[in-house]
Amino acid sequence: MTAPVISVDGLTIDYIVGAGRFRAVSDVSLEVPEGHVVGIVGETGCGKSTLAQAIPRLLPEPPATIGHGRILFGDMDLVRVPLWQMPRIRGTGISMIFQEPLNSLNPAYRVYDQVAEALQIRHLREAGHLTPDRREQPPFDYSRRPQPDAGEVLSKPIVPAGATARAARRARPPYPELREEVLDYLKLVRINDPETILDLYPHELSGGMRQRVMIAMALSEKPKLLIADEPTSALDVTIQAQVLTLMKELIEEVHTSILFISHDLGVIAETADELGVMYAGKLVEFGPVGDLFGSPRHPYTKALLRAAPTRYKSDGPLDSIAGSVPNLSRPPPGCRFHPRCPLARPVCKAEPPPPLLAPPGVAPGHRSACHFASEVPNLP
Amino acid sequence: MNPPGSTAWVGTQSRRAWQSVRTFWQVLRANPLTLAGFILVVLIGVTALLITVAPHLLTPYGSNSPTHAYAQPPSWAHPFGTDSGGLDIYSEVLYALPLDLGIAFAIAGVAVIAGGALGLIAGFWDQPNTAGGWTSVVILRITDIFLSFPSLILALAIAVSLGRGVWQLIVAVLLTWWPFYVRLVRGETLAVKHLPYVVASRAAGVTEGRIVLRHVLRNVLEPVVVYFTLDIGTVLVTLSTIGFVGLGVNYPVTPEWGSMMSTYQNAGLITAYPWTILGPGAAIFITVLAFSLLGDGLRDILDPRSRRVLAGTGAGGPTSASPAAPQEPSQQTVVEPGGTPTVVPTAGGSGGP
Amino acid sequence: MSAATPSPLVEIDRLEKFFPLTRTATEYFRGQSRRAIHAVDGVSLAIRPGESIGLIGESGSGKTTLGWLVARLHTPTGGSLRFEGQDIGTLEGAELRHWRRNVQVVFQDPVGSLDPRLKVWQIVGEPIRAQEQMDRQILRRERPRIRQENRRRAQASPPEPALPDPTVPHRLTRDELRARVREALPTVGLPPDCLDQYAHEFSGGGRQRLSLARAFSVHPKLVILDEPTSALDVAVQAQILNRLVELQRERNVAYLLITHNVAAVRYVADRVAVMYLGQIVEVGSVHGVLEHPVHPYTKALLADVPVADARRRRTRFRIGGDVPSLVDPPPGCRFAPRCPFVIDRCRVEDPKLREIVGLPGQLIACHRAEDVKEIPPASLLTTAGDTTVPTVTSPTATAA
């Protein structure tokens, strides 16, 4: 069993605002195995976006503070790595795409410039690691990347300087080759005739195209882990379908693992191998997606699955979840879901729920944080 | 429900008033610089009032009345010293305060009202090929013409042609000041008028005029008020500059900081009596600083969103006012579908919704 | 279910809305334009009282523009738009504002559609106040005429019954308005004492309820809902949709639900219209269209909706390319460039909405409707890499 690409262990993230502090993410632990797609699903305010942005340390560190916990990438604990060293890890280590590509693409630069920039950074870094005689070696095989080694990654310069810089500049591909590579990556994201969009600005592209360009940029750095924060929520259904298909195929081709954040259960069902469900900052259930959908072991997961409207008016009212998401500065005592839970008993209010445990009768790797996980199948 | 006039109604009204005062005070307290600005502005206002109605409280000397202490450096009797004509500079500075403030407010005030109204019209009714559209074009082009002159030069030129005097000074600066507000208000109006809530009001059947006044104006007002407050300082500096070059008001007949500085900096006098410019200089500095500090914090006071956050009731976490947080938890009402709605008081319930 | 079909509330007949594009200088001064965005291009639809119609389509389909046209937030550039038999396309000014009480809109963006500076009672009370002001104006105008008429009637022999004397009610006081708002709030599931809160203090679902309360405060006959659920979580969506259906039953109000969320339409709507590039390509009962979609675009749309069921992991049918632009569309079927069943006729001749044998009440705008009728959406899905598309053999068709 290969080591997971990334392993989050007991992560806690607080926000300090004015006089108060509130806990956006509470003691979350999960892993992304190599070559897998792990989905995180939850409602607005559950902390999934915070978690996603915390992994590459993209959160603004005041007001956000990472309380305790570890984020293990290779043998590096990303929480301990000083912020100024994080650019070494971002890009080729961990890459991220966001929900609204119009915001994440620079509106002042053309498509070619943006993709080429990502490629050039990668070339610079690779070249910086090459001594002159190593340049003759065969290209790096990304399908068999080893785990990043803290000693190696953190000691290499972010952008090489001095003698290595000169070597890097000599190693930088000339313009025609760079352009070819840009076109290759655009074709990788299934843009037909990519020559036509090279000179366009982001606002001249459609939403689906923009998101594909974003994916191309993210993948051109050949990251070990791609974090996708609601990448298709802003897209139309047919375009969303295309982009999701694309992402699944790319996992095979580029051997990247994906951490996929979404509020849409259908999208997660189609894309993810494992799924984590978050509620009010806590991870309440985690497991293989088929098992989780088929036999959920947490009342919230079950309610969420039931709430997706799939019926006609004549079939009766929709099931929704009573109540609403709690205010995270004053979370309910004990289990955070207990005010809305049909299985709630006094112990749920008194004691915090157990950590993620495997309830009986489920597939391996399926864990749930509920005192009464075994009773969940009896719920309607 | 409390009928108007009943004691309970009075209680409700006064409670509401007290709550807004309290929120205002909490916001001020949260931002010490703004508090300092606010206190300073209040002090300045009180001083201006006192010097007009009861000058003897602040200074023993009348306006423009020479003492027999000629050209004395600062001392206990004369905090800013006296000038070569024997006038106590401290008193003159104080007597100039209401005039300077008045001029500055008059200029900025009329500029806001006139420029703002024009900007609102130009921004809101700008459909091409309509009467409103052509009006808007005309307004904007005239504004552009005025803006293309460097404002200070233009003001000086007008001041020269009009001669000295208070009204002449006001007119000169005002004519160069109003175009900025047209630009500002028009930009804000353009941004606001396409927002969904304006369209929603139109869909509800509200007349266009009422939409402008109720929705557009109120939402445009906030940056304008902030700009206005900061502008007081800028106008004061402009006044001083005009006075400094010898135009505008005629000192020592009418005390005014700028013309005071102009008189005192004359080559011979400044080397002989260097302390004389300290008085008016300090006055300008403090006044401009006070309004700038207040203006900076005014946005937070006016915006209902940041009001709650700063007053500490928003300790419940980032609301939509803070863009840093990727999520948006906010105060919640708990509603049971199909059942009776119950309200869960959340952080910042401030007495319950 | 109405026994005799009542006359339609809204009748749309070949409605058009073109937005002119940038013009040359001469065109600017003459007020013409060569090129235009054909946002809504020949749409015909009828909405009956108390019926809810779902309008689905993707961005660029013109569904939002159509909704705004029905609410008269746009002026139609062609075709006719009738409300209760009256042509409203040419209404203007005070007449238009007075008519607005019949049709209200709930907008898509729960954040932007509520004025951040106003309190709840001001936001929800605004339509009430606007309409009652107009009522008073009208009464004031009519009062002398009615009194004169009453005098005439009193002097006629035999004396005719008098018309009721119009007393212009006083202007709604602030407290009266607040009372009305307080009554309106529980109908959408909001607590009645949140009158003095600001919009930003509510969650997304709460804000959407505020928009609903505002729309329903004047008891309109038709409510246009523009993507009411797209900014909401699943659980809140369910609550809002339940509420919408209940309100419809209580008040017999008609809905025009504009969304790309097929599940919402399935639940709320009685009939469904599918739009593509400014035209309706299929319309019928919600059971009919969603269970037996005929038009290739409808099939693709339904096939592509992700389903929260991990047992049915599928790969997708990729309709080639992106949505083409709305500017000066070429003749022929708009979907032809992307349609897997396209034949030469499709590129030349505009298909018209028509019924086909076997599916009564469902209208489809496709030349090959009979051929493709039986192909289920699921069969349009392919496995990865397989780009072959099911062909339909028929004597008149050429393989796609």
Image (cartoon, grey):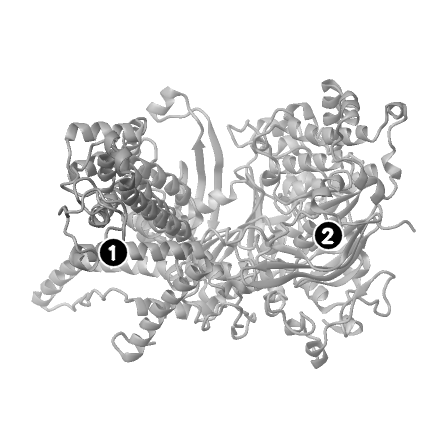
Label 2 marks a residue whose chain is: A
Residue A101 quadrant: top right
Label 1 marks a residue whose chain is: B
Position of B99 with respect to A289 (left or right) is left
- Residue A54 drawn at (x, y percent): 69, 51
Q: Which residue is mark 2?
A: A268
- Residue C140 drawn at (x, y percent): 19, 59
- Residue C320 visible here: yes
Amino acid carrying label 2: it is Ile
- Residue C109 drawn at (x, y percent): 50, 51
Query: Could you tell me if the residues under marks 2 and 1 are in contact, i.e. CB atoms within 8 Å?
Result: no
Amino acid carrying label 1: it is Thr
Residue A156 quadrant: top right
- Residue C92 visible here: no
Position of A334 with respect to B105 (left or right) is right
In the rendered view, tell whether residue C22 sits above or below residue B315.
above
| Local secondary structure at mark 2 | helix
- Tell me the quadrant of the picture where the C terminus of chain A can be found: bottom right
Looking at the rendered structure, whether the residues under marks 2 and 1 are on a common chain is answered as: no
Residue pictured at 60% horizontal, 51% vertical: C261
User: Toward the viewer: B190 or C390?
Assistant: B190
- Residue B125 drawn at (x, y percent): 32, 39
Q: Disc 2 or disc 1, which is closer to the eye?
A: 1
Residue pictured at 55% horizontal, 38% vertical: C60
Residue pictured at 38% horizontal, 68% vertical: B19
User: Toward the viewer: C78 or C391?
Assistant: C78
Q: Which residue is mark 1?
A: B47
Residue A353 quadrant: bottom right
